[in-house]
Amino acid sequence: MAVAEHRNFTRAAKQLGISTSTLSQTIRNMEERLGVRLLNRTTRSVVPTVAGDTLLARMRPVVDEYEAAIESLNTFRDKPAGLLRLTVAPPVAQFVLPLVLAKFLQRYPDIRLEISGDSANVDIVAQQFDAGIRVSDRVDRDMIAVPVTGRWRLAVVGAPSYFSRRGEPKTPDELLGHNCIRVRLSSGAMLPWRFQRDDKPLDLAVSGSLVVNLDTLVEAAVFNGIGLAQGPRAQFEQEISDGRLVSVLERWQPVMPPFSLYYPSRRQTPAALKALVNFLRQTHSGKGAR
């Protein structure tokens, strides 16, 4: 099931916590035992055969029922237990979750968390995540969404050494003459720089000499005066306060929707996920833009 969902042995093996060679041999042994080919393998993809699709269609309800039966035992435990797999937007993984996870795991020692940071909108059902955390307006309507932050504000920041060389931009349009550090999403698209003008959203296609896909690389580049960066203000708040970074274009920065934890409405909610949802609701203290 994992190989068919990922269409890739390496990603499926990573999800299952085993080696790619072990997974490949397991599939090969199963095909030999059953006497039919279940997967067509090429150098670029792995696709179920007709026999494989037939087996998947019959096995999925069986596996779901098995998981529901195991989950039902949680009602006899004093505290919820089990593994929760979450896909989380990088800003939340870096600045929100660390503040609450220690207390959550202390309260529920039998729950294990596996967190995957990803800027893309991940299909949590197809990739077998229990839940995800994304900006609210990017959550599909068929999901149950629970806000875990208040609204938050963006910021454009740079090091004093950068501004001493290049000067400060006074309007977003002047960023076109600056070196802007851009972020490439896992989908391949560039993360746009967002502003507001007369209460209307404005996306700006900035340019620069550096493109990254990690927030830590953005921070290092900004601190070293390479260029300007845009991100959640909370990400740079301490550095702005102590003067290591300077925030510019503040009146142009939009207020963004809250981040929300979301999960499928059509599935039985595991007890461990219920515990996390309730915990985040209790600890959510965002009351407006930050």
Image (cartoon, grey):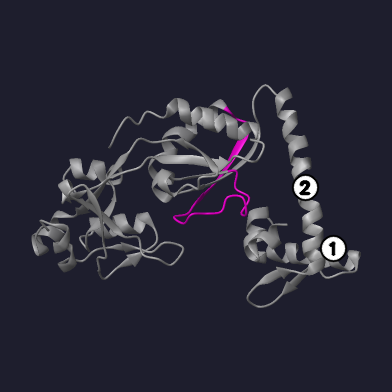
Q: Quadrant of the C terminus?
A: top left
What amino acid is found at the position of numbered circle 1 in the picture? Met
Closer-to-camera residue (113/188): 188
Does the magenta segment cover residue 128? yes
What amino acid is found at the position of numbered circle 2 in the picture? Pro
Q: Main secondary structure of the magenta part?
A: loop
CA neighbours of label 2 inside 10 A, class few (<14), some (14 to 19), many (20+): few
Work out whether 231 lies above or below 3. above
What is the quadrant of residue 285 in the picture? top left
Q: Position of residue 239 (x, y in %)?
A: 23, 45
Q: Which mark is residue 30?
A: 1
- Residue topped by disc 2: 61
Residue drawn at (36%, 55%), measured in percent from left and top? Answer: 215
Q: Which mark is residue 122?
A: none
- What segment carries the magenta color? 108-130
Give the alpha-carbon distance from disc 2 to disc 1, as whole Å: 20 Å
Q: Position of residue 42 (x, y in %)?
A: 69, 77
The answer to whether residue 188 of the structure is visible from this angle is: yes
Work out whether 263 lies above or below 20. above
Residue drawn at (38%, 42%), measured in percent from left and top? Answer: 95
Does the magenta segment cover residue 199? no
Q: Position of residue 287 (x, y in %)?
A: 32, 29
Of labels 2 and 1, earlier in sequence is: 1
Closer-to-camera residue (222/253): 253
| Badge 1 element | helix
